[in-house]
Amino acid sequence: MPHLRFRAVEAHIVESLVPTLLNELSSLLSTARNAFTFELINTQYFAEGEAYPMVEVLWFGREQQTQDQVAQVITDQMRQLLGADSHVAVVFIPLQRTAYYLDGQHF
């Protein structure tokens, strides 16, 4: 934990992002690198206009300032690869420790 899910992004972009995001986010959150997971979700969008990249961050909630910093790190790093004018959505999904189980035990 945290778990980052990418949508409307090509696989090579996510592969390029993982090392730099791991470095910056593990330091910012004081979280071990092996606690992070990254997932690319292939999605079909049904809306007018082009889909824009979205990153969902599933995690145990943090303070607003920390959340803002993480959103900025993700946005900045994605724009480095996609272009400075790219729209990037970052959505945080806070998880309750008592509702998250690993090997049958909640946190």
Image: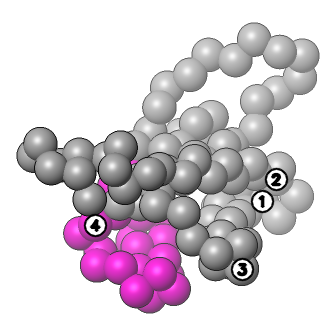
Whole-percent x and y of residue 88?
75, 51
The residue beneath circle 3 is 65
User: Upstream in the sequence, badge 3 or badge 4?
Assistant: 4
- Magenta extent: 13-38
- Distance CA(mark 4)–CA(mark 1): 29 Å
- Name the residue carrying label 1: 83
Cα separation, mark 1 vs mark 3, equals 25 Å
Q: Are marks 3 and 2 in contact (CB under 8 Å)?
A: no
Q: Which mark is residue 32?
A: none
From the image, tell me which residue sits under label 2.
86
Q: Can you say which quadrant of the picture contains the N terminus? A: bottom left
- Residue under the image location 71 percent in, 73 percent down: 64
User: Is residue 17 one of those drawn in magenta?
Assistant: yes
Amino acid found under the numbered disc labelled 3: Gln
Q: Residue at x 89, y 16 (%)?
A: 48
To which residue does mark 4 refer?
Answer: 35
Toward the viewer: 36 or 9? 36
Residue 79 shows in the view: yes
Dot 4 or dot 1, earlier in sequence:
4
Where disc 3 sits, the SS reads helix
Q: Which of the two residues, 98 or 87, is positioned nearer the viewer here?
A: 98
Question: Who is closer to the viewer here, 29 or 38?
Answer: 29
Q: Amino acid at mark 1?
A: Gly
Count residues near mark 1 (Cα–Cα under 10 Å), then give few for <14, some for 14-19, many for 20+: few
Mark 2–mark 4 distance (CA, rounded to whole Å) = 29 Å
For residue 59, side relative to residue 74 (left or right)? left
